[in-house]
Amino acid sequence: MIGEPADPFATPLEILPEWYFFPVFQILRTVPNKLLGVLLMVSVPAGLLTVPFLENVNKFQNPFRRPVATTVYIYIYIYIYIYIYIYIYIYIYIYIYIYIYMYVCNRVMETKKGFHVFYNDFVESSKNKMAFNFISYLLVAKY
């Protein structure tokens, strides 16, 4: 036997995360609203990204005295913004099109209309043909 036998009635008082998750755990524990806790957790790295711009800035100093660091942080902001934009706009947009496509396929199958004619009209009227081609590649095999 490796250790003492397990006693299910003698659990520890509080299970704590590892040391690197402890500040986030404290934020979630002290804030009663979950959404506010998540927003506070996101604000920590956002605040750290603003430190180079706020560091030692007064009216007598040039805030762009470090052009390399400023350029790097501007690129980081742009990268994060583009990543969030791509995730929210493209991926969720594709999921909406999958839902619309499945709804259209179900309506066509229920009414026994011509699938190809209705599908081509629906795709031609859409803005994003590439998403529909991708969705049709994934879903047409089931029908």
Image: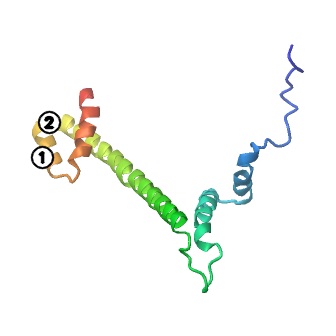
Residue under the image location 26 percent in, 39 percent down: 134
Residue under the image location 46 percent in, 60 percent down: 75
Residue 108 sits in quarter = top left
The front one of 21 and 101 is 21
The front one of 81 and 132 is 81
Q: Amino acid at mark 1?
A: Asp
Q: Amino acid at mark 2?
A: Phe
In the rendered image, residue 56, in percent from the top left (x then y), is placed at 65, 76
User: Which quarter of the rendering shows the C terminus?
Assistant: top left
Residue under the image location 15 percent in, 52 percent down: 125
Q: How many marks?
A: 2
The front one of 116 and 45 is 45
Residue 11 sits in quarter = top right
Question: Compared to 111, does 6 lie above or below?
Answer: above
Question: Compared to 46, does 115 lie above or below?
Answer: above
Q: The residue tagged with tag 1: helix, strand or loop? A: helix
Residue linked to disc 2? 115
Q: Earlier in the sequence, mark 1 or mark 2?
A: 2
48 with respect to 8 (left or right): left
Residue under the image location 27 percent in, 27 percent down: 142
Question: Compared to 106, does 76 lie above or below?
Answer: below
In the rendered image, residue 21, in percent from the top left (x then y), is placed at 71, 47
Report the disc number at residue 121: 1
